[in-house]
Image (cartoon, rainbow, N blue to C red):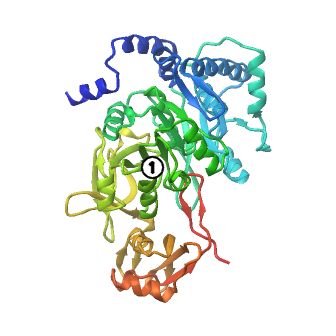
């Protein structure tokens, strides 16, 4: 009964929808572009996507994707087993291209165009099949089979070539990275409906379905950004995007397009909250994902946008699995929250202590003999049964035989008024096994001595958890998905 109520709230029980869905599935099969045709049929002239300068309705979006698909198909019909690589920004052109490539049935690798050229080339070189690389002229990659995005769009304006859309589910692959920035390639699970029960639970629980427009403040080349884009279009919302803009310009686009929801990683949410503080915006909901929140970011968000914030936990492999609301984040900034419908989990004790979170493999593209996927994340339950994220399994520090979670130390460091950012890591030691290294960045104009930091830490935690060394840094580097990279010291 609850599921039916959710479907009613989302408008999915409208009797016209099954008919339009049937027609779209008959043409596109398992290809995700059937969702675009459904949108074109059901939402028609509503705005589907906008960037502050141009906009496309759902009907126009599908028409543009179909035309672009025909050109790509024409250029690749003599090539077999080709993998498409899109060096992607959040422009409308690139989003059209993202769907058009899928419409041809080609396997698609999405790469953030802010990656260093060497990293992009390394990812391309890992592909077994020949690659057709789509990039803007600004990238100027030295690769074979390079297609300039701008020229491709000029071509589509002159010539339209009919073709039959592919009916197979086109694989979409995302490079993802940890705090080291090293990339690994993860393929999204194929199929259109395996996520549907979790999707309805997520959008009704958070209230996403009530919002009219979504600003996607995370690259669509990241699993979280891609999911935010798809959810917006499925729900008939306006997806607001901004390519290669600074934070002031992005804030202006949010104001201009009257975005009511912002989806982003904590870093992007912090900068947007600071830029929009005191402005007459219409943002009423914040969805955070891709990395854990910190107290500084949460405080800035609530000051600018209010307390209607949700933090999503998941992975590129498993998509969103848990959602924490503001009350749970207030209890503990690293709270995972409630598991979504269809998500099953358990805690697995690891050697040396601690519990790794395991998730049922039905939501993932990763095969497991046991049926459970090892997330690599360490979690614990508090006295109320709330799951708390404690860090990555390979980040856990074992000092003198004691398990120490970096996130606990970071939390206490960030509670100090002078410290803006903190990153705790480890270093091998011949006697202690591993020792604790902390990197801290002060707010502008203030500082505190290392000795004072250690004194304060000893007042709130065991001495063995106090860092063995503290390094002061002026800036942190970030991966394209907003995760901090360990500073390289001179």
Give x and y (percent) for residue 240: 55, 36
Give x and y (percent) for residue 432: 43, 85
Quarter of the image with the N terminus in it: top left
Which residue shows up at 50% across the image and 45% down it? 280
Specify the quadrant of the image occupied by residue 327: bottom left
Give x and y (percent) for residue 486: 57, 68
Q: Is residue 18 above or below residue 398?
A: above
Which residue shows up at 46% across the image and 53% down it? 304
In-front residue for pair 76/211: 211
Residue 220 visible in the current orientation: no
Relative to 252, 22 lies left or right: left
Residue 409 visible in the current orientation: yes
Q: Rate crowding at label 1 as few (under 14), some (14 to 19) or many (20 or more) other CA atoms within 10 Å.
A: many
Q: Is residue 414 above or below residue 363?
A: below
Which residue shows up at 32% across the image and 64% down it? 350
Relative to 81, 176 lies left or right: left
Which residue shows up at 61% across the image and 51% down it? 247
In-front residue for pair 262/23: 262
Specify the quadrant of the image occupied by residue 203: top left
In-front residue for pair 43/202: 43
Give x and y (percent) for residue 80: 67, 26
In-front residue for pair 34/325: 325
SS at circle 1 = loop
Q: Is residue 268 above or below residue 394?
A: above
Quarter of the image with the C terminus in it: bottom right
| Total number of numbered discs in the rendering | 1
Q: Which residue is mark 1?
A: 289
Specify the quadrant of the image occupied by residue 174: top right
């Amino acid at each position: 009964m609850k599921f039916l109520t959710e479907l009613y709230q989302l408008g999915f029980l409208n009797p016209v929808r099954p008919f339009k869905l049937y027609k779209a599935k008959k043409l596109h099969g398992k290809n995700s572009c059937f969702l675009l045709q459904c949108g074109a049929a059901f939402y028609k002239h509503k705005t589907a996507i906008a960037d502050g300068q141009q906009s496309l309705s759902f009907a126009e979006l599908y028409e543009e994707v179909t035309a672009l698909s025909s050109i790509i198909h024409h250029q690749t019909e003599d090539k077999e087993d080709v993998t498409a690589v899109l060096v992607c920004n959040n422009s409308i052109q690139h989003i059209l291209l993202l769907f058009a490539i899928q419409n041809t049935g080609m396997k698609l690798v999405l790469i953030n165009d802010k990656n260093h050229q060497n990293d992009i080339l390394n990812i391309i070189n890992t592909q077994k099949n020949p690659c057709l690389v789509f990039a803007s002229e600004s990238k100027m990659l030295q690769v074979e089979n390079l297609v300039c995005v701008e020229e491709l769009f000029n071509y589509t304006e002159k010539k339209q070539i009919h073709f039959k859309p592919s009916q197979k589910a086109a694989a979409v692959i995302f490079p993802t990275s940890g705090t080291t920035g090293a990339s690994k390639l993860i393929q999204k699970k194929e199929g259109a409906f395996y996520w549907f029960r979790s999707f309805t639970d997520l959008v009704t629980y958070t209230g996403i379905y009530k919002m009219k427009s979504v600003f996607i403040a995370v690259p669509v080349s990241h699993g979280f950004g891609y999911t935010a884009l798809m959810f917006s279009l499925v729900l008939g919302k306006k997806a607001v995007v901004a390519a290669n803009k600074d934070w002031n310009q992005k804030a202006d686009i949010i104001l201009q397009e009257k975005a009511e929801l912002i989806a982003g990683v904590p870093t992007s949410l912090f900068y947007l909250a600071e830029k929009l503080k005191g402005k007459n915006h219409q943002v009423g909901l914040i969805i955070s994902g891709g990395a854990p929140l910190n107290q500084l970011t949460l405080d800035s968000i609530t000051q600018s946008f209010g307390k209607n914030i949700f933090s999503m936990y998941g992975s590129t492999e498993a998509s969103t699995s848990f959602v924490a609301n503001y009350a749970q984040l207030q209890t503990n900034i690293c709270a995972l929250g409630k598991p979504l419908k269809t998500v099953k989990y358990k805690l697995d004790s690891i050697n040396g202590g601690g519990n790794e979170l395991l998730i049922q493999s039905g939501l993932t593209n990763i095969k497991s003999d046991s049926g459970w996927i090892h997330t690599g994340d360490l979690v614990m339950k508090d006295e109320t049964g709330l799951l708390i994220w404690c860090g990555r399994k390979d980040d856990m520090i074992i000092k003198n035989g004691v398990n120490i979670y970096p996130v606990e130390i970071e939390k206490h460091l960030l509670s100090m008024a002078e410290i803006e950012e903190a990153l705790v890591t480890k270093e091998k030691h011949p006697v202690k096994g591993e020792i604790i290294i902390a990197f801290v960045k002060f707010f502008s104009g203030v500082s505190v001595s290392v000795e004072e930091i250690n004194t304060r830490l000893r007042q709130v935690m065991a001495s063995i958890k106090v860092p063995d060394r503290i390094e002061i840094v002026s800036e942190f580097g970030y991966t394209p998905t907003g995760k901090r990279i360990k500073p390289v010291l001179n």
